[in-house]
Amino acid sequence: MKKIHLLLLFLCFNFLFSQKEKYFPAKYVLKSSKDTIKTKILNIGLYDNDEFSPATYIQQITVLNSSGKKMKVNENDIKYLEIRDLKKVKRTFVNSKSVLPAASGLLQVMYSGNKTQWYRKSDYTGSIYTYETKNTDYLIMRKNKNINEIYFWAPGVKAQLKEIFGTYPDLSLLIDGMVEDKDLVTILERYDKK
């Protein structure tokens, strides 16, 4: 009986931690070069490697070089990164020094319009299998170059956004109904048209 329990425990452990590696098409530019490197990047998903995870690029990325061997590239050495996941969603990242001089690493470009820009900085703590991702969002108003640090899922974010866009009642109504990232993108697109 003990052997069966041990065998089941071993099989469950192997099943949990034996995800097949998934590579996403990507291209990046290093700070030290102007060449665009097209490659495949290893996705590091917590439960599912088919879905994009910020752990893919935090601290370092694992890419396949031209001969198919794995190679590590530090996050701080990257100037520009573009990833297309298996669901065909394109994500663009820029070096944070170009946007926020005091920051380091990569920022995900969530929206870039005529009047506003929205960037997301992801960090994690813990081991790769138990990490917790913390996102900090930066909303930049181009006119006065104001940088607003927001936490998209924090309780006070709607009040903060209403303060920023307070002169537009139609945007305030949209802010009240905001649930996902795409809702904020819709708000910023409408603001850009004003």
Image (spheres, rainbow, N blue to C red):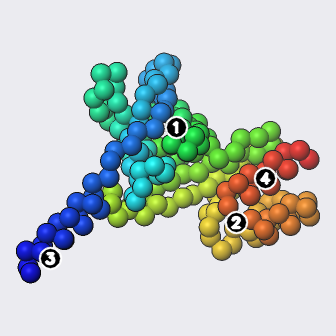
Type of amino acid at the residue the image marks with label 4? Thr
Residue placed most toward the observer, 99 or 181:
181
Type of amino acid at the residue the image marks with label 2? Val
- Residue at x 40% of width, y 59% of height: 47
Q: Does residue 54 appear anywhere in the picture?
A: no
Going from N to C along the chain, the mark reached first, 1 or 2, is: 1
Type of amino acid at the residue the image marks with label 1? Ile
Question: From mark 2 to mark 4, how far is it between C-alphas?
Answer: 11 Å
- Residue at x 41% of width, y 50% of height: 49
**Looking at the image, do the residues carrying marks 1 and 3 touch, with CB atoms under 8 Å apart?**
no
Identify the mark at residue 179; answer none if there is no mark.
2
Q: Position of residue 19 (x, y in %)?
A: 32, 52
Crowding around mark 1 (Cα neighbors within 10 Å: few <14, some 14 to 19, many 20+) is: many
Residue placed most toward the observer, 174 or 6:
6
Crowding around mark 3 (Cα neighbors within 10 Å: few <14, some 14 to 19, many 20+) is: few
Going from N to C along the chain, the mark reached first, 3 or 4, is: 3
Crowding around mark 4 (Cα neighbors within 10 Å: few <14, some 14 to 19, many 20+) is: some
Question: From mark 3 to mark 4, how far is it between C-alphas?
Answer: 53 Å
Type of amino acid at the residue the image marks with label 3? His
Q: Position of residue 194 (x, y in %)?
A: 91, 47
Q: Residue tagged by mark 4? A: 186
- Residue at x 29% of width, y 33% of height: 70
Q: Does residue 165 appear anywhere in the picture?
A: yes
Q: Residue tagged by mark 3? A: 5
Indicate which label's residue lies in the foreground, 3 or 4: 3
Indicate which label's residue lies in the foreground, 2 or 3: 3
Identify the mark at residue 43; answer none if there is no mark.
none
